[in-house]
């Protein structure tokens, strides 16, 4: 299920990508990096959203018979509004009185502030999900993060927001491993790689300053590169990788205690199966056989993040996005793996008994 919006008036899907088709094979593929205006048009995001009052009806005149029913909209619903697409009149959601609409063009303006600076940042993908209630934009930063050899990380900015009140505005920095398109959402310690804020009156001003809050600087890229390069030089045995995976994937304190106590027979079946899949990816995936990943701590970390990106099934791309970027299971387990790996390079095998 792709959940990419299809405009019934134009017959077009709200998605564009540069050079390569997405897995869902929908939307428009372009051969040149577009301007923000072109990107919005290609992705079908050149619509606006209004906040409209909600009304209810006098039920005393409603009998369930079309010939007798008289529906009079005479009662306002206080402090709640509908968010509506002005081009299709589709209701996208119901929001409170403090909710302020962030127009798509305003979301793109954040990237325009960076792209327009002539620093090589380019729009890569954009699109809308559902009826247009959620939009997303990605932009590629110039250069790469070099781990070792040909193991490179491309640098991306992701911006996503909703028009239905279900989530705030999120802007994030994420490195993507070139060899397998695996999002390494590492959440480096002491360096915040994303910000999220609500649709309030000052949201636009905060978005204008988002690149400062994100720490999207050469410093963040350098710290990422230094960390992963170091990890790629630290060796770890296969049994230790297995143990690290079990610790990182434990879904609860109770299961974690079972792992520490080696009570394998009491582990939940789902947990056992998941650990086996992650370990299989760690040992057999082609992307795990590079100089940087084979038998290294970096490879162990990438096994967990790669499982969630490349192996695990999700209900929809939106579900996958929430899992990886918005504090879902994928982000939690990947962050745990990051912490264990960070401890392992300092404490060795002791880290696998102290987490």
Image (cartoon, rainbow, N blue to C red):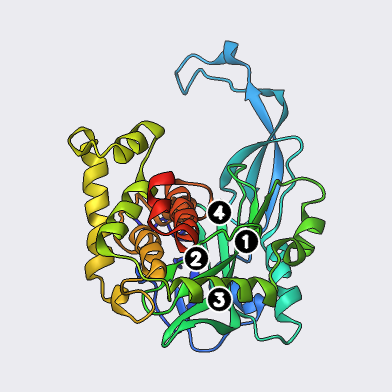
Badge 1 density bin: few <14, some 14–19, many ≥20, Cα 10 Å: many
Calculate the distance from the C-alpha at mark 1 to the C-alpha at mark 4. Answer: 21 Å
Calculate the distance from the C-alpha at mark 3 to the C-alpha at mark 1. Answer: 14 Å
Badge 2 density bin: few <14, some 14–19, many ≥20, Cα 10 Å: many
Q: Decide: marks 3, 1 in contact (CB < 8 A)?
A: no
On residue 134, which mark appears? 4
* Residue bearing mark 1: 193
Residue depicted at 65% across the width and 86% down the height? 120
Calculate the distance from the C-alpha at mark 3 to the C-alpha at mark 4. Answer: 32 Å
Residue 288 lies, in percent from the top left, at 31, 73
Residue depicted at 38% across the width and 56% down the height? 349
Residue 51 lies, in percent from the top left, at 71, 44
Q: Point out the frontmost of discs 1 and 2.
A: 1
Residue depicted at 52% across the width and 61% down the height? 186
Q: Point out the frontmost of discs 1 and 4.
A: 1
Q: Tell me the quadrant of the picture where the N terminus can be found.
A: bottom left
Q: How many marks?
A: 4
Residue 89 lies, in percent from the top left, at 60, 49
* Residue bearing mark 3: 225
Q: Closer to the N terminus: mark 1 or mark 2?
A: 2
Q: Tell me the quadrant of the picture where the C terminus can be found.
A: top left
Calculate the distance from the C-alpha at mark 1 to the C-alpha at mark 2. Answer: 27 Å
Q: Point out the frontmost of discs 3 and 4.
A: 3
| Residue nearest the viewer, comparing 130 with 251 | 251
Secondary element at tag 4: strand
Secondary element at tag 1: loop
Q: Closer to the N terminus: mark 1 or mark 4?
A: 4
Calculate the distance from the C-alpha at mark 2 to the C-alpha at mark 4. Answer: 11 Å
Q: Residue furthest toward the top?
A: 60
* Residue bearing mark 2: 14
């Amino acid at each position: 299920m792709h959940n990419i919006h299809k405009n019934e008036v134009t017959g077009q899907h709200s998605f564009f990508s540069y050079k390569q088709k997405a897995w869902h094979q929908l939307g428009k593929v372009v051969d040149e990096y577009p301007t923000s205006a072109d990107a919005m048009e290609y992705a079908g995001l050149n619509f606006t959203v209004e906040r409209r009052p909600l009304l209810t009806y006098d039920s005393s005149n409603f009998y369930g018979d079309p010939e007798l029913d008289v529906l009079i909209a005479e009662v306002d619903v206080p402090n709640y509004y509908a968010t509506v697409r002005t081009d299709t009149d589709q209701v996208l959601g119901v929001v409170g009185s403090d909710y302020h609409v962030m127009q798509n063009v305003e979301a793109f303006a954040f990237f325009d502030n960076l792209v327009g600076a002539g620093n090589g940042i380019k729009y890569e993908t954009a699109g809308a999900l559902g009826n247009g209630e959620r939009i997303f934009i990605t932009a590629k930063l110039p250069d790469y993060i070099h781990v070792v050899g040909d193991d490179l990380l491309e640098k991306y900015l992701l911006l996503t927001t909703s028009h239905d009140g279900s989530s705030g505005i999120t802007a994030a920095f994420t490195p993507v491993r070139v060899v397998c398109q695996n999002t390494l959402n590492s959440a480096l310690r002491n360096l915040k790689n994303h910000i999220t804020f609500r649709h309030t009156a000052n949201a636009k001003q905060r978005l204008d300053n988002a690149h400062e809050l994100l720490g999207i600087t050469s410093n963040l890229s350098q710290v990422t590169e230094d960390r992963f390069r170091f990890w790629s030089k630290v060796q770890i045995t296969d049994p230790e990788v297995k143990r690290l995976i079990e610790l990182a994937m434990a879904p609860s304190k109770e299961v974690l205690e079972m792992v520490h106590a080696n009570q394998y027979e009491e582990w939940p079946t789902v947990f056992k199966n998941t650990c086996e899949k992650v370990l299989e990816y760690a040992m057999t995936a082609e992307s795990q056989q590079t100089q940087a990943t084979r038998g290294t701590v970096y490879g162990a970390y990438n096994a967990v993040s790669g499982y969630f990106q490349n192996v695990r099934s999700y209900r929809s791309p939106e579900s996958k996005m929430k899992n990886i970027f918005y504090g879902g299971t994928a982000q939690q387990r990947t962050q745990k793996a990051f912490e264990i790996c960070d401890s392992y390079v300092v404490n060795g095998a002791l880290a696998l008994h102290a987490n």
